[in-house]
Image (cartoon, rainbow, N blue to C red):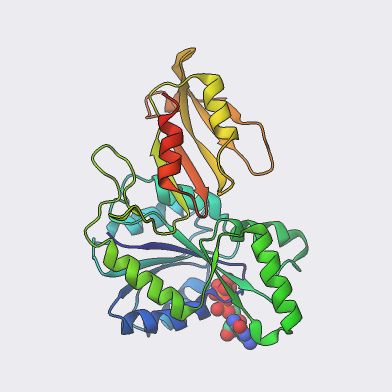
């Protein structure tokens, strides 16, 4: 299996610059690098810049990967050969809604040769939360990050740097602050440890980040099967009581009192109530739960799901 990394960060935050430092360090460690770029017209320019560094780069020219060119992205990833010892990096466009994209990268059934996604967010520390109406998007791109890199620190006073670090921790206390060198080491060890691991076991349960000793790697999202039918009140209580590490949760569920119908369920940040929408197109699908967040424990989530039966 190949580590899958979503690289996010606001427009101009320094994602490409981070890559130009990260790639040589990965290559030095013997890790081969593939990159998909989704950067509107810039994709070709950045592709040329990064291609010089011996990474295999595919530019996507369509719209933002979380909407227009999603299918193109998933097809590109599917076509990547299973190449243990390499890593796959996706540089998202600066306007990407990372929670949506993590969801697709986690639940797409064709991506069996990739780990559950990690997310690295590059932050322009000089402009952190000084983006007016885009502050919400910048914070949202940080909430789902397993790793954060503070960039543009050459323009900062120590006071501002501390304030930004505290601000980032306030929206996501679990993300690890990292540098290109540290991230290269993280990816090398992940690439080594998942060489022989499948993303799912024969029962469809995610195994990707579970080590033999119960230790788990950081991941940004995971999809787990739910029982075929569940008791409605117990399910709603389960969703409401999800641990704080879960930033966003959604999926498909069938209830004992209405077993013929499938519902899409949603837990949105800041809303206590679980949204339920009946969905006939999903009538024959498997009941499932997608969890997006940082520092989630697979064991804990599986125990909670087991308690639903
Ligand atoms: N002085 C300084 N310049 C930087 C820093 N990070 C990035 N830059 C410059 O800012 C510009 C944008 O950086 P990129 O790495 O292309 O940013 P990006 O996040 O990939 O940008 P988009 O793809 O447009 O979203 C480039 O000219 C970089 O050289 C930094 O930490 N300090």
Q: Quadrant of the N terminus?
A: bottom left
* Residue shown at 52% from the left, 80% from the top: 17
Mark yes or no: residue 127 visible. no
Question: Dividing the image into four equal quarters, which quarter contains ligand 1?
Answer: bottom right
Q: Position of residue 227 (x, y in %)?
A: 39, 27
* Residue shown at 37% from the left, 46% from the top: 108
Q: Nearer the viewer, residue 296 or 108?
A: 296
Q: Nearer the viewer, residue 134 or 273?
A: 273
* Residue shown at 48% from the left, 52% from the top: 102
Q: Judge from the rendering whether residue 137 lies leftward or rightward of residue 40; answer left or right.
A: right
- Residue pushed farthest front? 213
Q: Judge from the rendering whether residue 1 lies leftward or rightward of residue 49; answer left or right.
A: left
- Residue pushed farthest bottom? 154
Q: Nearer the viewer, residue 201 or 155?
A: 201
* Residue shown at 34% from the left, 45% from the top: 206
Relative to 272, is 58 above or below? below
Q: Position of residue 212 (x, y in %)?
A: 27, 54
- Residue pushed farthest top? 257
Relative to 176, is 283 above or below? above
Q: Position of residue 285 (x, y in %)?
A: 38, 29
């Amino acid at each position: 299996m190949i580590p899958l990394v979503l690289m996010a960060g606001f427009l101009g935050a320094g994602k490409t610059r981070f890559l130009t430092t990260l790639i040589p360090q990965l290559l030095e460690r013997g890790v081969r690098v593939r990159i998909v770029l989704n950067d509107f017209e810039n994709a070709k320019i950045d592709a040329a810049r990064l291609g010089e560094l011996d990474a295999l780069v595919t530019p996507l020219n369509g719209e933002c990967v979380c909407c227009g060119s999603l299918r193109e992205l998933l097809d590109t990833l599917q076509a990547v050969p299973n190449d243990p010892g390499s890593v796959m990096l996706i540089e998202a466009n600066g306007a990407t809604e990372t929670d949506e994209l993590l969801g697709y990268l986690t639940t797409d059934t064709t991506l069996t040769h990739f780990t559950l996604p990690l997310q690295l967010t590059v932050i322009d520390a000089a402009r952190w939360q000084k983006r007016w109406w885009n502050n919400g998007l910048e914070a949202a791109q940080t909430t789902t990050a397993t790793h954060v890199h503070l960039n543009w620190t050459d323009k900062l006073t120590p006071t501002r740097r501390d304030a930004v670090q505290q601000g980032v921790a306030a929206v996501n206390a679990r993300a690890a602050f990292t540098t290109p060198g540290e991230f290269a080491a993280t990816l090398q060890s992940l690439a080594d440890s998942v060489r022989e691991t499948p993303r799912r076991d024969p029962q469809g349960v995610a195994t990707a980040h579970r080590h033999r000793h119960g230790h788990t790697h950081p991941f940004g999202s995971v999809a787990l099967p739910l029982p075929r039918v569940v008791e409605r009140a117990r399910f709603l209580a389960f969703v409401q009581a999800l641990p704080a590490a879960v930033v966003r949760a959604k999926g498909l569920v069938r209830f004992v009192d209405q077993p013929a119908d499938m519902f899409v369920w949603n837990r949105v940040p800041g809303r206590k109530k679980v949204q339920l929408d009946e969905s006939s197109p999903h009538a024959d699908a498997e009941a499932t739960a997608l969890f997006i967040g940082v520092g989630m424990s697979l064991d804990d989530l599986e125990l909670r799901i087991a308690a639903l039966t």
